[in-house]
Amino acid sequence: MKKLLNTLYITRQDTYLHKERETIIIKQGDQKLGQFPALTVGNIVCFGQVTVSPPLMGYCGEQGIAISYYTEQGKFLARIYGRQVGNVLLRRTQYRFADDQQKVISLAKLIVGAKIANSRYVYLRQIRNHGESSSLQLISDRLANCLSRCEQVNDYQQLLGLEGEAALAYFSGLNELIRNNEFSFSTRVRRPPTDPINALLSFVYSIITQECLSALLGVGLDPFVGFLHKERPGRPSLALDLLEEFRAAWADRFVLTLINRKQLTSKDFVQEASGAVHLTDYARKTLFAAYQARKQEEIIHPYLQERVQIGLLPHCQALLLARYMRGDLEYYPPYLVK
Amino acid sequence: MLINEDNYLPISALQHYAFCPRQCALINIEQAWAENFWTAEGRLLHERVDGGEAEQRGYFRTERSVAVISHRLKINGKLDLLEITGRHPKKYFPVEYKRGKPKIENWDKVQLCAQVFCLEEMRNIEINEAAIWYWKTRKREYMIIDQSLRDLTEKIIIDTHEMIESGITPKPTFSKRCLSCSLIDLCEPKIIQNDQSKNYINGIFKV
């Protein structure tokens, strides 16, 4: 498998990034904050007032290093990506697949199936590690029921309904997995999140979505043409499709770990007058450090049967998806927690 | 008449095809490229070889990175070094630079022969001899461009054209040579050769 490259998250305000020989230098005023060999960097993510020099941008484009810009609060703004990789034949195949209802439904079904199976696994694991719980067992059973119905579905609207039903069941038990009495979770709220757990979930989903987007571009697929997610201007539908497989297994469990290990406390969140909740600078820094460490952890990929780092999962899945579309594989094997 | 050169093959594709048709398709159809130790070493070697002015010493002239083309075979590429001696007739002697050592297989010879085809067509001459210089042995290996090599090279050119026109990347067969291929991570020969996706997806819905 390819090498897992680092992501540089620049959260400090008024910083300036530039290139010196084959390294990336981060400065604030005249003070040098850090210097990294460009070879080891795959992504640069800038929050708020961060300036990147044009020569560094050009170099990143050449080397396939993506630069993306977010507001200080973490809202995605823009991305700079170099020469398009892959070829038009694959993208056309992808578009033809997206126009073919039979292909759309069969692929979307696999993605939803994997999503439900992975959600259920969160509860199975909890029961295994922390003992029998009738309420959690009930959720697991309901998810199992959704899963077996998912296999029979042959209609897009029905599939969406099933996905919604499974998500509702899944989130209904999430509060029981929180072992830190500073926090609680009742229901999933987005745009804006109004409690810390929802703020964390939204934040982590958006980070992983961007990684899925990069991975798809990297194998030559168009991240904006999806199957489960329909196209909408500005929405990276295929990246969101890919994210589904990772939500429960990777994103949610990462958020729970941060909270349960008390790496974050209620002081790490700010509530605005509107009720919207977001992370403080410090919390974001803690999160990124933990996230980078998590990405280094190795698992055995369930389909490839190879040791891969968690951070490479988006690439693995993008690669398998491309291989499926090219006709190398009969079916797309989504990521399943084992 | 305007000649459409869109569908011309790069000569390098022939060597890739001879090594592995799937590798050739990954590079020329799927536009994939990845560097590993061997490709990086080759690139550095060529940075040294390429460029530089043509040199003329009496009736001996050397030119580097010479662009060549054959409209008959629809191929084009570059010659590393071309030595031209004599006056009437001039003798053309192409030299290809290679990173490794002489190989058992014909890949390097095929590439050289394709370059010879181009030169012959461009200058309307016949070339019977050429050489490959190997970095490891630091020696020239002289090659006779005989009929059997010409036949083999023409066949590979036709096959490669056909594959690229089809736009279909052939399935892999895993072998020892995969281990030295820089595209192994994109190709995933073992996984594709042994397609278990049907079993795998059935497992998703098992409760």
Image (spheres, coloured by chain):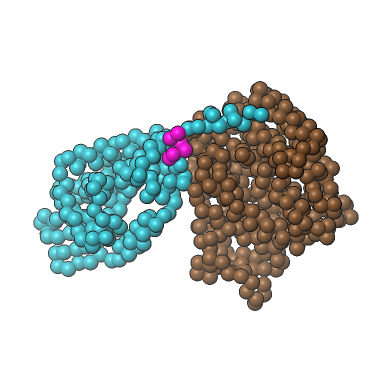
Chain colours: A brown, B cyan
Residue B120's x, y, as percent? 20, 47
Where is the C terminus of chain A found, in terms of image quarters? top right
Residue A216's x, y, as percent? 57, 44
As displayed, is residue B34 above or below residue B58? Answer: above
Q: Is residue B75 left or right of residue A130?
A: left
Give the residues in magenta: B189-194
As displayed, is residue A251 above or below residue A92? Answer: below
Would residue A286 be counted in the magenta stretch? no
- Residue at the image position 72 percent from the left and 46 percent from the top: A252
- Residue at the image position 58 percent from the left and 50 percent from the top: A298
User: Depth check: A115 or B88 in front?
Assistant: A115
Magenta stretch: dominant secondary structure: helix
Residue B169 placement: quadrant: top left
- In the displayed image of the protein, which residue is found farthest to the left? B88
Q: Is residue A162 left or right of residue A305?
A: right
Would residue B190 be counted in the magenta stretch? yes
Residue A43 placement: quadrant: bottom right
Residue B74's x, y, as percent? 30, 41
- Residue at the image position 31 percent from the left and 46 percent from the top: B15
User: Depth check: B184 or A241 in front?
Assistant: B184
